[in-house]
Image (cartoon, rainbow, N blue to C red):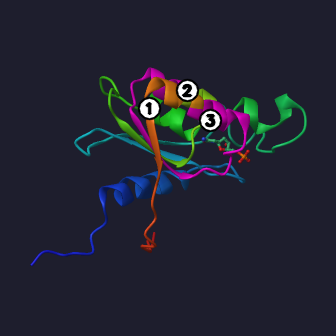
Amino acid sequence: MKRTDYISWDQYFMGIAMMSAERSKDPSTQVGACIVDKNNRILSMGYNGMPAGCDDDTMPWGKSGAPLDNKYFYVCHAELNSILNYRGGNLKDAIIYSTLFPCNECAKAIIQCGIKEVVYMSDKYAMTESTIASKKMFDMAGVAYRPFEAKGRKITLNL
Ligand SMILES: Nc1ccn([C@H]2C[C@H](O)[C@@H](COP(=O)(O)O)O2)c(=O)n1
Ligand SMILES: [Zn+2]
């Protein structure tokens, strides 16, 4: 008889997004994303980090101070990185799993590349204008979004 406690597709893809977030150097918020097609094939992954060639040992990781001296002008978000990391044809009708709800800038990229669904884990910035704008654009553009429903399944990895 087959094993019954295998993880669902949602758990599999959000798990990969969570694992991707572990690569982030951001000391405050680590975000991961995983893009899949409608046949449950993984297309791409990403996490938040400094742009390629921008030394993450010398770039700022703080949240405050002058705009040029904190991380926000520089960090490339997990969702955008996952889109840019894709090496195939196009992302039409794909699904993006993200550990954090996409910001307005990533929402624009998600819409423009044809992704049709967003599955998110945290919506901790739901009250910000950025997230409100994301939802407004997703609603208008017909991009569905739904929270990941954690089932409390624990997996320990001894890496
Ligand atoms: N949807 C998002 C939102 C944020 N990020 C990145 C950008 C920063 O590295 C970090 C947020 O920093 P915080 O203000 O929480 O200290 O997360 C992302 O990748 N995707
Ligand atoms: Zn973003």
Q: CB at mark 2 closer than 8 A to ligand 2?
A: no
Three-letter amino acid code at the position of disc 1? Val
Gap between marks 3 and 2, in whole Å? 11 Å
Q: Earlier in the sequence, mark 1 or mark 3?
A: 3
Q: Which quarter of the image is occupied by the C terminus?
A: bottom left
Residue bearing mark 1: 143
Magenta span contains residue 115 = yes
Q: CB at mark 3 closer than 8 A to ligand 2?
A: yes
Provide the residue span drawn in magenta: 108-135
Q: Which mark is residue 137?
A: 2
Q: Which mark is residue 103?
A: 3
Q: Nearer the viewer, mark 3 or mark 2?
A: 2
Gap between marks 2 and 1, in whole Å? 8 Å
Q: Residue shown at 55%/40% (left/top)?
A: 78
Gap between marks 1 and 3, in whole Å? 14 Å
For residue 35, side relative to residue 102 (left or right): left
Q: Which quarter of the image is occupied by the N terminus?
A: bottom left
| Residue 57 x %, y % | 72, 43
Q: Secondary structure at mark 1?
A: loop
Q: Is residue 51 visible?
A: no
